[in-house]
Every structure is written in C-alpha cells, then in structure tokens.
Image (cartoon, rainbow, N blue to C red):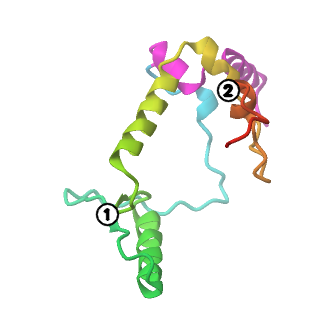
Amino acid sequence: MVSSKLLEDLKAFDETKRGVKGLVDDGVSRIPPIFIHPLSPSLSSPAPPKPTSAFSIPVIDLSGFEDLMRRKDLIEKIRDASEKGGFFQVVNHGIPIALLEGMLGGIRGFFEQDDEIKQAYYSREDLDRKGDDNRVLKASGEVGKSAV
C-alpha cells in the first residue's frame, strides 16, 4: 500500500510539470522517495557483475545490413549487447553527422527552455499505442497541417 505522504509528494512533483530536470535545477542532492521502489520479494535479482577495469562499450557496425545473413548477425550482436551491458554504440548507420548534431541541438534547446514552455509537454499519460499520439503537434499547433 502506498502511503498518503508518498502520494502527496508525487502529486506535488507532477503539479510542478518540471520533471526530473526541475529537481536538478533546484539542486536536489538526494533521490526523492517517490523514485525509490522496494524490490518485490518474489523477484529474484541476479548477482551484480564483478567489477572489471576492462569494461568496454560494444561497437556495432551496421554496414552491409542489406545482406540477409549479415542482418541476422547484426540482430544477434544487438541482442547480446543489450542483454549483457544494456547499451552499445552504432557506427556506419548512414545518418549524416549534421542531422545527428541538429537533433542533439534540438534536444538541448528544448530542455534549456523556461519551465513554463516545457510544462505544455509534461504528462504522465501513456502514449497512444496506436501511433496516434499527437501531443507535441497539438501543443505546437501543427496538427492537421499538410506535410507537403
């Protein structure tokens, strides 16, 4: 059962519509209780991996993915990297550097905006699983405009 204090804290957090970045901006130095969830006794946790100084981030080269056998190999490499480390670097994906830099700039630009602007996009609602989530477009007034 969730305590009423925890529910109050969660409601207060949601009402700020500033998200975790708002906590960081406020200088919070400890993880708030609303983000700490005890493990269920029925869940068994695997033993943590032994520390190693030889840790490296897997690099997955997507060149040649058009070939069916190569694609199967890539899928296995992605699965393996995802299961073992949880992340990996992709190279030779064909996305121009300028596009990637523009995307990162857009992300930074969004998060550096005033809280009042970002609050229009804050929601705890699940995304529409039918691919019909137009929150961003609705907020920007772009819904219904032709892409041509």
Q: Is residue 78 above or below residue 144?
A: below
Question: Which quadrant of the structure image shows residue 119?
Answer: top right
Nearer to us of marks 2 and 1 is 2
Q: Amino acid under label 2?
A: Tyr
**Magenta span has 136?**
no
Structural crowding at the residue carrying mark 1, measured as other residues with C-alpha within 10 Å and reported as few (<14), some (14–19) or many (≥20): some
Q: Quadrant of the C terminus?
A: top right
Residue 124 visible in the shown view: no
Picture coordinates of residue 121 (x, y %)? 67, 26
In the image, residue 126 above or below residue 17: below
Q: In this view, does 127 lie to the left or right of 47?
A: right
Q: Is the magenta stretch mostly helix, strand or loop?
A: helix
| Residue 14 within the segment the image draws in magenta | yes
Mark 2 or mark 1: name the one nearer the start of the chain: 1
Task: Give coordinates of residue 22: x percent, y percent.
Answer: 54, 18
Q: Mark 2 points at which residue?
A: 121
Residue at label 1?
Answer: 58
State the image quarter where residue 101 is shown.
top left
User: Magenta stretch?
Assistant: 1-28
Q: Taking 5 as reference, is 71 above or below it? A: below
- Name the residue at 31% across, 63% down: 58
